[in-house]
Image (tube, rainbow, N blue to C red):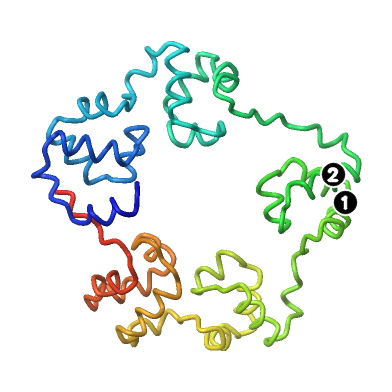
């Protein structure tokens, strides 16, 4: 959905929309499945359902209805997947799990992958790889940290670990090995947190739990928060509106859901003080539409 359309559709009165207007909205939003529509615009989906328009909108916008997956032919399933423009099996399964499962049960996956140009990940025999081959693989994959390598290719990581190659591979591929946070000085820890550009204590804890825990055990959290401009949870209630706006701008929250998830304490304080609307406007955060 374009930014212009989102902006124009803030707080629409969906009750007054005609079927033609609703179809236009769904087409412009380019929803591929009922699940995607419901997830991205639950209010408009609910309004259409209450008016009994779902089937007409699905038909007009080319959205496949879940109940039809079992009756689809292979050719129809291929056409659906091509239209959905999925790039990987994982993306297809995530965006339309029901169609994926039907295709899997019918044994069509390989044919659909081939017809739609979806690359099938063939698991290499990591155990037979030499150290040089493993280094070459890790370099090509451009892993930045051991954690990323483990998350994206656990099979190769486990084999390298079992063979005792981790340190050699990390060194050859310039992958930073987990720092010994316990030996860091306060100044070094402040420098690390500044460079990492953590906006909240929760973000720091989520992205680098080891460093956060080490700082917590040493009693450095408050000093680091102050040095790096990270708001402490207990400070939210004492913030002025201007300070809260500055914090939200710095955090670069795109939606109120992201703000609430990343910093529930500040969101709760702003909500209690009735500042949400003012902050949304000041920071360019879209206000939830009145779908009713």
Quick one: SS at disc 2? helix
Q: Residue at x 22, y 29 (%)?
A: 57
Question: Which residue is located at x 43 percent, y 31 percent?
Answer: 96
Where residue 81 appears, x then y in whole percent? 47, 25
Q: Total of numbered circles in the picture?
A: 2
Front one among 213 and 133: 133
Left or right: residue 132 versus residue 196 is: right
Q: Is residue 144 above or below residue 109?
A: below
Q: Position of residue 53 (x, y in %)?
A: 16, 30
Q: Are marks 2 and 1 in contact (CB under 8 Å)?
A: yes
For the residue labelled by badge 1, is the local secondary structure a helix, a strand or a loop? loop
Q: In the rendering, at what x and y percent does residue 285 appear?
A: 32, 65
How crowded pointer 1 is (Cα within 10 Å; few <14, some 14-19, many 20+) is rated as some
Q: Of all residues shown, which one is farthest toward the front? A: 4
Q: CA distance from mark 2 to mark 1?
A: 9 Å
139 relative to 227, above or below: above
| Residue 199 disc label | none
Task: Determine which of the numbered discs, if any, sits on residue 165 in the image.
Answer: 1
**Residue 230 spot, x, y in % from top left:** 50, 80
Q: Determine the residue positioned at 33% across, 67% down.
A: 284
Residue 134 — which label? 2
Judge from the rendering whether residue 142 lies leftward or rightward of residue 205; answer left or right.
Answer: right
The residue closer to the viewer here, 201 or 228, is: 228
On the image, which quarter does residue 38 sit in? top left
Does label 2 or label 1 sit earlier along the sequence? 2
* Apparent side of residue 270 relative to residue 139 in the rendered image (left or right): left
Residue drawn at 11 percent across, 37 percent down: 18
Query: Callout 2 environment at 10 Å: few (<14), some (14 to 19), or many (20+)?
Result: many
Q: Against 81, is 132 above or below?
A: below
* Camera-nearest label, 2 or 1: 2
């Amino acid at each position: 959905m374009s930014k212009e359309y989102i902006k124009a559709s803030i707080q629409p009165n969906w009750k007054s929309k005609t079927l033609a207007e609703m179809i236009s909205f769904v087409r412009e939003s380019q929803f591929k499945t009922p699940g995607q529509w419901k997830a991205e615009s639950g209010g408009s989906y609910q309004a259409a359902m209450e008016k009994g328009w779902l089937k007409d909108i699905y038909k007009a916008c080319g959205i496949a209805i879940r109940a039809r997956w079992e009756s689809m032919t292979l050719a129809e399933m291929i056409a659906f997947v091509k239209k959905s423009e999925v790039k990987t099996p994982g993306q297809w399964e995530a965006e339309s799990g029901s169609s994926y499962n039907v295709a899997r049960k019918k044994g069509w996956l390989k044919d659909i992958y081939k017809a739609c140009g979806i690359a099938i990940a063939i698991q290499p025999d990591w155990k037979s790889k030499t150290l040089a081959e493993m280094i070459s693989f890790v370099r090509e994959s451009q892993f930045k940290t051991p954690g990323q390598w483990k998350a994206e290719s656990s099979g190769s990581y486990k084999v390298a670990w079992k063979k005792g190659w981790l340190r050699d591979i990390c060194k050859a591929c310039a992958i930073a090995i987990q720092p010994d946070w316990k030996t860091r000085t306060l100044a070094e820890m402040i420098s690390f947190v500044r460079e990492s550009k953590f906006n909240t204590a929760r973000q720091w804890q989520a992205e680098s739990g080891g460093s956060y825990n080490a700082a917590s055990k040493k009693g450095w959290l408050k000093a680091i928060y102050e040095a790096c401009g990270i708001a402490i949870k207990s400070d939210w209630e004492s913030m002025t509106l201007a300070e809260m706006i500055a914090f939200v701008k710095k955090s670069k929250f795109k939606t109120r859901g992201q703000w609430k998830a990343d910093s529930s304490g500040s969101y709760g304080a702003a909500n209690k003080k009735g500042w949400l609307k003012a902050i949304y406007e000041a920071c360019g955060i879209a206000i939830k539409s009145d779908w009713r």
